[in-house]
Amino acid sequence: MSLSLKNYESESSAIRRIQTGEEVGKSINIYEEDIKIPSKLMTLLRMGLVEKGELETMKRALKSGEDALSQPVLRKQIFELFNKLVDAVSDDQQIFVRMRKRLQTNTKGEED
């Protein structure tokens, strides 16, 4: 069995091809488009829940689902969003009461 160099691509050629975006769509399966971020959450994100420079990273983290937890940058984004949402719920008495009622209603429904 002999090895052929016909299909060999140099490292610099591959890097240049990737940087210019050639065939990237063909070679990488992107499933993020299947996941939709709720419009209300997108509104909050755009209004300042995340910094403007981090909006695209946050969208990628949310669309990645559980895969985001294996990537440090995306995991950090999810953690920061979680902390902001927990702070919002616990700091505002009205939101806290509504969340508590929602959880009680869901718990009663699960017991039946």
Image (cartoon, rainbow, N blue to C red):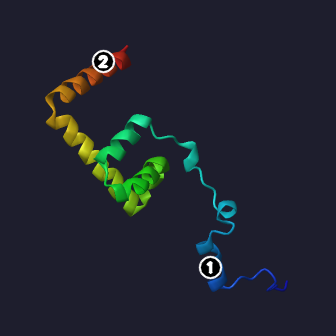
Residue at the spot 62% in from the left edge and 79% down from the top edge: 16
- The nearer-to-camera label among 2 and 1 is 1
Q: Where is residue 89 in the image (x, y as percent from the top left)?
A: 21, 35
Q: Where is residue 107 in the image (x, y as percent from the top left)?
A: 31, 21
For the residue pair 77 and 47, the one nearer the viewer reads as 47
Tell me, yes or no, if residue 75 can be seen here.
no
Most extreme residue toward the right is: 1
Q: Which residue is tagged 1?
A: 16
Q: Quadrant of the N terminus?
A: bottom right
Question: Dot 2, crowdedness within 10 Å: few (<14), some or many (≥20)?
Answer: few
Residue at the spot 31% in from the left edge and 16% down from the top edge: 108
Q: Which residue is tagged 2?
A: 105
Q: Are the residues at dot 2 and dot 1 in contact (C-beta closer than 8 Å)?
A: no
| Amino acid on which disc 2 is placed | Thr
Quarter residue 38 falls in: top left
| Amino acid on which disc 1 is placed | Arg
Total marks shown come to 2
Q: Where is residue 68 in the image (x, y as percent from the top left)?
A: 44, 54
Give the numbered dot on residue 96: none
Q: Where is residue 24 in the image (x, y as percent from the top left)?
A: 65, 65
Image height of 109 relative to 34, above or below? above
Q: Distance between the residues labelled 2 and 1?
A: 56 Å
Question: Dot 1, crowdedness within 10 Å: few (<14), some or many (≥20)?
Answer: few
Residue at the spot 38% in from the left edge and 62% down from the top edge: 73
- The disc, 2 or 1, on the residue closer to the chain's N-terminal end is 1
Image height of 29 relative to 93, above or below? below
Residue at the spot 33% in from the left edge and 58% down from the top edge: 76
Tell me, yes or no, if residue 104 can be seen here.
yes
